[in-house]
Amino acid sequence: MDWRAQRAAGLRVRATGPAGTPGTVVVLTAGLPRFGYDIPCRVVWASTEGDERGFAYGTLPGHPESGEERFAVRLTASGDVVFTLRVFFRLASPAARLAGPLSLALQRLATAGYVAAVRRAARG
């Protein structure tokens, strides 16, 4: 219920609150420190109790895409950790549409980073 997966995917994180609080605004920054681009989002859903916990954020104006990402982790009765990442989006900014395949490759790269971070966390 924090921003570790985003940081592990190589994004810098500035947030007005925790990931588990709907309404939290987070600005993820990709790229080099002075030459990065900001990716603004708002937490739109969170589940902080029970066997499944997670949060989802939706894009805000200025994001190169329009859509949502949902991150959830469930602990099964047998002790397995199941991570679910659901993403839906369309390329929204003119630059993202122009970059087309590169934009999609960057989305896949971020997704792979999120999954790798959760795997590392699950191993302890």
Image: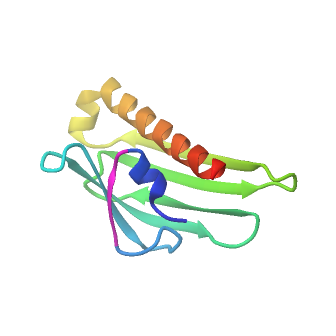
**Image coords of residue 58 (percent x, y):** 44, 58
Residue at the extreme left: 34
Residue 36 as seen in the image, left or right of residue 124:
left
Task: Identify the coloring.
Answer: rainbow
Q: Residue at x 48, y 67 (%)?
A: 19
**Image coords of residue 47 (percent x, y):** 64, 69
Nearest the eye: 45 or 54: 54
Q: Residue at x 50, y 45 (%)?
A: 114
Q: Residue at x 36, y 34 (%)?
A: 106
What segment carries the magenta color?
Answer: 10-15
Give the main secondary structure, helix, strand or loop, of the magenta stretch. Answer: strand
Residue at the extreme right: 78
**Image coords of residue 100 (percent x, y):** 31, 27
How many numbered circles does the render carry?
0
Nearest the eye: 80 or 50: 80
Residue 105 higher or lower than 94, as above or below: above
